[in-house]
Image (cartoon, helix red, strand yellow):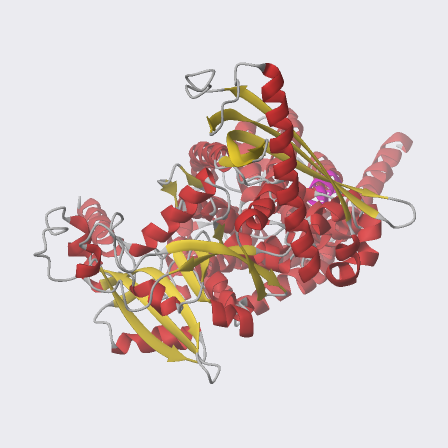
Amino acid sequence: MERAKINAGQLFVLIFLFEMGSALLLSLGIEAKQDAWLAVLTGMCGSLFLFWMYYRLYLFYPDMLPTSYMQHIFGPFFGKIAAYLYILLFMYNGARVLRDFGEMLVTSTYTETPLFIINALLLLIVLYVIHKGIEVIARTGEILFVVLYVLAVTGSILIVVSGLINIDHLKPVLEGGIGRILKTAGTETLYVPFGEAVVFFMILPYVNRPDKIKPAMFSALVLSGINLTITMAVNIAVLGVDLTERSQFPLLNTIQAIQVAEFLERLDVFFMIAIIVGGFVKISIYFYAVVIGVSDLFRVKEISSLIFPLGLVLLFLSMVIASGYAEHIKEGLRFVPLYMHLPLHVILPALLLTVAALKKRHSMNKRKQS
Amino acid sequence: MKTRLCCLTSALLGIILLSGCWSNEELPDLALVSAMGVDLEKDGRYTVTVQVINPGNVAGESTQGTGESASPPVSTFTESGWNLTEINRKISKKVSRHMYYAHTNLIVISEKLAQEKGILQVFEVLERDHEFRSSAKVVISYRSDAEDIMKTLSSIDKVPSDKIINTMKATEKAWGEHVSVSIRELIAKLVSSGEEPVVTTFHTTRNKGETLQSIQQTNPAGRLKAAGLAVFKDGRMVDMTTGETSKGIVWLLNKVKNTAVSVNWEGEKHAAVYDLMRQQTKVTADVEKGGDIRMKVDIAAEGNASEVKIPINLASPDVLNKMEQKVEETIKQSILSAVDKAQDLETDILGFGAVVHRTDPEAWKRWKKEWDERYFPDVQVDVSVDVFIRRTGLRNEPFHRN
């Protein structure tokens, strides 16, 4: 473990930015049609439970990385396999976010630039910040948080001022019933974006005041959930369900629709900055988790020696996971939640928690007996 | 020291090399497309005419109107083909610069294309393309080709596309027979099952307004003017409305801002004029148990009495009350004529379906498939108009009162 500490406020900021990350890019929960925003909200509520699970796990082993305590819980052999699976998950998710980010830029703005170049440039910055360690990521996060909020507030004001919001687009509420919302939340929004924050159990041991973790985590989750809900509701209110559904990047279209006083328009850059900020933090967190996970699991003392090789793997992975954007999205919506997120975000942590709790009770009983 | 120098050099190199885009285009290499017109050929091909801005002739004040400027503010280029992407590439045979569509703010579709082939296919690419702005406005050419509209110069606004857009906005605000529709709004209505779009049509005189001489007179020879509202059904233009019917449609869409309403008074036609300042139209649906649908249209309008041709005592509240009732009746007639027209054409340009959808989602599920043909024509409409005359201008009684 790196000898570094971040405070609870920084944890809050990191979780918030992480959640906003690539979630701003997609039409979250659009399968629930005009109730997508409710699906996001429901997903957020569900993820509070997931977070509670991750937090309880942390409480059992406050000074250890998950990659170590998994070996404690499951025994060295199965524990190592589980830890390895998580490293693979973080690597893959990191590559996905990098790909999302690159695809967005290539599709909307840099149409003639090769994807590889864009991904490589962003990754270069990520590698640099990882090299500097978690404290620097956290401090960068604090600055970027302010940037993102200024953008969000200005953007919202401009959208309202240009009179784009048409509440009728959100009606009728609950047309497909509660069932459709629960289904969308359970198959999609629970995992992306909220469940993805499972990666933070790798970060929790670095927080200096353990007692403040719980409020920081949950408030970050709730705040980001509310923000995403508002974003989705605004997207639908401005664009209508149909366009939000067909749009690759609905928020970009919403922002493009802003026209105030004939001169404040074409504010695409708002969207770009927000996505780059969120994408940067998200990739950094994933990659940091990969690096410390690998160093912990394979007992590599010098973290910096891992950064460049693993960075190259991440970069190439981001290029090869899909041959095109349609394939990339299809994988992300159909296969990843079912085969990766459900087992690794929900089932395995639940298993870990159960076994850890049983072990604890067992050892306490033993102590009582002796 | 050495490492520091290395770092500094690489940082500086990075700043120099990484700034700007991979595929940068210098401004002098771009052809700024201000408007695009699409026509239909006999064999089903599209003909696209783009209006490209001549930067030098738009910027300087001195070149305009002196008669010395050798070339007009815009040039047009025409090319035909089976799809718009191909045409856009082929047009490079005629233009020396890279076609740049990010500033295109007007799309003109010819009447023939809108009637025969429908507009769905044209807008697919315009929505998908990253450079094109979905906030661009759409108009239909009336009794002229889109190409003619592209070629007509205008006198007050230098760029003709600006002239069309500004005219459309100005008349929407002042008179209320037309609506300005953007690509985004148009597509939203095309895909919605309970709404069909209306689009403003524009007319010009063929071969008249293409030269600089044509605008060097007080009454320009080729004149672009708003004609009516093109009514669409399933992506095809089925009819065009004008006059009071158009106004009724705009009323029902709640887009009337200002307008003038004239009423007859004791045998004299159009004797008193009401100047509308602001209004609010609310459309609600009432779905009865038996499946009868009643739409309720409530209008509250506020304005002034602005002109009388016969001696009426405008100082008297009773007279104003009477005038209010007459105005209410006129507005009501205009709205009912719009409803009749839409029901005749079996196309829900008034957005009643969307209102029903919001009011009764369950019933809408059963109706939406056959809404336009089966249910919409039988919808009963109750109109209630509430007009207020607040002021009568600077005078009370007219000077010709005796």
Report the front residue among B142 and A11. Answer: B142
Q: In this view, does B55 lie to the left or right of B172?
A: left
Expressed as whole percent of the image width and height from the top left, the position of residue A2 reads 50, 41
User: Residues in magenta?
Assistant: A38-46
Left or right, residue A258 beside residue A361: left
Quadrant in the rendering for residue A146:
top left
A197 vs B149: above or below:
above
Q: Residue at x 58, y 53 (%)?
A: A26
- In magenta stretch: residue A223: no
Q: Magenta stretch mostly in which secondary structure?
A: helix
- Whether residue A41 appears in magenta in the rendering, the answer is yes
Above or below for A211 versus B100 = above
Residue pushed farthest front? B402
Residue A238, position in %: x, y?
A: 57, 44
- Seen as rendered, the residue at the extreme left is B68
Q: Is residue B87 above or below residue B3?
A: below
For the N terminus of chain B, the image quarter is top left
